[in-house]
Amino acid sequence: MTPVKKFLISPSPHLWRGPSVSKIMYLVVIALMFPSGAAVYFFGYRALSVLGVSVGAALLTEYVCRRMRGHTFVMDGSALVTGILFGLILPPTIPLWTVAVGAIFAIAIVKEAFGGLGHNIFNPALGARAFMSVSFSLPMTTWVEPTGFGVDAVTSATPLSGLSGWQQFDPAAYQAMFLGNTAGSLGETSALAILIGGGLLLGLRVMNWRIPVIYVGVVSLLALAFGQDPLFHILAGGLMLGAFFMATDYVTSPLTNRGKMISGVFLGVLTMLIRHFGGMPEGVCYSILFMNAITPLIDRYTKERPYGLVERARSAG
Amino acid sequence: MLTGQKIGDSDKFVSVPVHATISGEIAGTAMVMNPATARPVEALVVASDGADEWVQLEPVENPEALSPKEILDKIREAGVVGLGGAAFPSHIKLAPPGDARIDTIILNGCECEPYATSDHRVMLECGEKVLSGLNIIRKLLSPEATYIAIEDNKEDAIEHMEDLIVAMGFKKDIKIVPLESKYPMGAERILTKLLLGREVPIAGLPLNVGVVVHNVSTTKAIHEAVVEGKPLVERVITVTGAVNSPKNLLARFGTPLGSLIEYCGGIVGKANKVILGGPMMGFAQFDLGFPTMKGTNSVVVKEDTIVTEQCCIRCGRCIEICPMHLMPTLLAKYARAGRYDQCKAAYVDNCFDCGVCAYVCPANIPIVQYIKIAKRELAKRAAKK
C-alpha cells in the first residue's frame, strides 16, 4: 500500500490554464513600452520624468491605499499599467507636481475608493485626466513640438486643435502624425508605436479586437459622412491610444462580445460628435469615460442567450 | 457471496440493482462520502475470498427473439447505468415516455474528460461488443439515424470501428462522425448540438429533441447484460497522471483507489492530489481507501498547489468559452453574495460543471464551486416547497 500521506482537497477543475491577472498586466506593460519608447524618443527627458513621476506616485499610492484598507499589497502590475497610461496621456510640459497629484487621484479616488482592481467604474488613468483638465486647465492644454532630447521646446498647436490639416491632404504631415513627430500628449502622437503595442496584445489574445476596430471604424465612417478625411481623424489626437489601451480596459468595458461591439459603435459616435460639434478639440477621453459609466447598462442588455433557451419556449408554447 | 450476485435493489423509478463485484464474505458496512453529493452514504464491504467465483450466468442463445420488455428488464437487472460519468440508469433512457419519439441515436466515443483514454481502448478492444450493444438499442428505439461520434485524433479507433461496421453488416445505417477533440465535446448536450445542431432544452434531456446519447462503455455493458446475461460489475478506468506507469485498467467497482494506483506503480514525485474522475470534473479524494464507482471513468494523480482567489477583472474569458452560453462570472458573483434567485434567473441550472470557466479564469476564481453551491441551495429550497 502507498504510504499514508496528506492529500490536497479542492473543488474541480483541477487544471488551470493561465494567464494570471499579473501576467496579463505585465503583457500590457510590455505593449505600452512601444508608445512609451516613442514618447521618450520624441519628447526626451520630459517624457522620462513625467512617466517616472506618474508610475512612482501610482505605485506608492496603491501601496498606501491597500495597507489603509487592511489588504496586503500585491504587485499585480495594475497600478503600473495605470501609472504608465496616465503619463502617456499628459502634455510633455506638464509640471511634475501636478503629475503626482493626478496619479494619486487616479489610484486613490478612481480605483481604490471604488473597491480596487475589478471594482472601479471608470478607467483610473482617464478619470484622473478629466480631473487634471478641470484642475490644471492651462498646462493641460499647452502643447509643444517634439524636440527629442533637445531642451528648447516650441509651443505649438496639436493637429486637432490647430486649424491646419483639416481640409487638404499633406503627405509629410500625415507621415509625421503616423510616426509620432507631432505635438500632442506624450503617448498619443505615434500611431505606429500604438499599433505595434496593440497588435502584440491582439496577437496574444490578451485584447479583444472588437472595441478598437469598431471604434476606429465608426470614427472613419462618420468622418466620411461629415466630408472630412478619415485618416486625419484616426491619426490626430488620442483616438489610437484611447481605442487600443483605454477603451479595451477589461474592468470598465462590457463583458460580452456583443456588448463590446455596441460599446465600440457608441464610442465612435460620441467621439465624432464631440470633435465635430463640441466645444473641445478632442473627445476620446470623455467618450470613453461616458461609456464606462453606461457599461453596467450595456451588460444588463447584452447577456448571452443560454443554450437551450429557444427550444424550451417553443415546447412550452 | 458470489461475484455478480444481486445484493441490493430499490423500487424507486430511477434505480438499478447493485451486484457483488467480487466473491467472498460480507465484512460489514461502512460510511463513505458520495463525492457528487458530498453526503455520506452507506456502503457494503466485501472481504474477498480470492476465488472470484461467479454466479451462474444465463446467456441468451438468440437475442433477436427477445421482446423490448425483456431486453429492458435484462438491462435493468444487470444494473447498467450510463458509464459516461452521470451513471443514469440506462433502461430509463431506453424507454422514452409515450409521446417522445427518438429519431437519432448517438454512440458517444468521445472521452468525457481530458487525460481519459478509456473509451478509446474500449472501442479498440471491445468494438464488437460495443456495436452489438448499439444494435440492441437500435432495435429498441428504431431511430432514423445512428451516429458514432469519435474524436478526430483517434484515427485508429475510427478505422477500427469502420471496419467492424462493414464486417458486422451495419454499413448502411451507422455513420461515424469524427469530431474535433475539444473538451467538453463529450458531454451529451454539446454533442447533440455539434452533430445535429439541436439544443437540448434547459433542464430537459436529449430525448426532448428526439436524441438518445450512449457512451461506448455503456453499450458494451448492454451487450453483456442482454446477450451474456452478465451483470455490470466492472469497467475500464484510466489511471494516469503522476503514477509510475499510467494504464487503462478493467477494474471491478469498489476497488480502492490505492489498489489501482499501486497497480500502476504508485505515486510519483511530489504529487499530492488524487482525483476520482477526470481533471476537469473529478473529485479530489483524501482517502486512498475510497472505492471506484460506476461513473468513475478515470483516476488522476497530480501535483497541485493552493491558489488564492482574486477579484474578477471582468476580462470575459469565462463568458466567451462557456459551452452553455452562460455568464459564469456573474453566477459566481451572485452565489458568493447568496443571491441564489438571481443565479436561477441567470439559468444556473443549465451549467453541467464542465469547468472550462474556472480553467481559463485569470483571477483563480473557483467559479464551478460557487455555481455548485448555488445549485445545491436552489435544490434544497425546491425540495422544501
Image: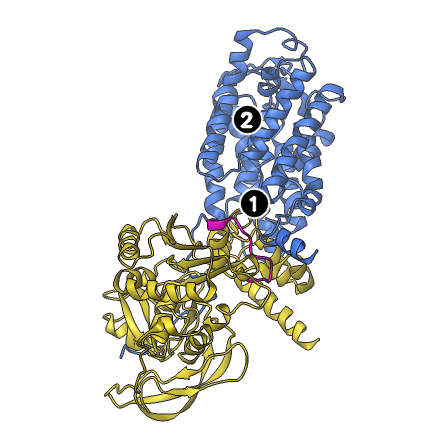
Q: Which mark is residue A187?
A: 2
Q: What element carries label 1?
A: helix
- Tag 1 subunit: A
**Residue A41 % position (x, y):** 47, 21
- Neighbor class of circle 2 (other Cα within 10 Å; few <14, some 14-19, many 20+) is many
Give the main secondary structure of the magenta stretch: loop
Residue A140 appears in which quarter of the rendering? Answer: top right
- Neighbor class of circle 1 (other Cα within 10 Å; few <14, some 14-19, many 20+) is some
Label 1 amino acid? Leu
Instruction: Look at the image and give the colour of chain A.
Output: blue
The answer to whether one can see residue A172 in this image is yes
The residue segment tinted magenta is: B194-205
Label 2 amino acid? Gly
Residue A57 appears in which quarter of the rendering? Answer: top right
Q: Is mark 2 on a helix, strand or loop?
A: loop
A138 inside magenta stretch: no
Find out whether the residues at labels 1 and 2 contact each other: C-beta distance under 8 Å.
no
Q: Residue A60 carries which label?
A: 1
Residue drawn at (54%, 56%), measured in percent from left and top?
A: A72
Q: In this rendering, is residue A269 above or below A164?
A: below
Asked if badge 1 and badge 2 are on a common chain, one would say yes
Residue drawn at (42%, 52%), measured in percent from left and top?
A: A17
Residue drawn at (52%, 8%), measured in percent from left and top?
A: A172
Measured in 3D between alpha carbons, the distance from the residue under mark 1 to the one under mark 2, in whole angstroms, is: 22 Å
- For the residue pair A314 and A114, the one nearer the viewer reads as A314
- Tag 2 subunit: A
Residue drawn at (50%, 31%), measured in percent from left and top?
A: A198
Residue B321 placement, left or right of B378:
left
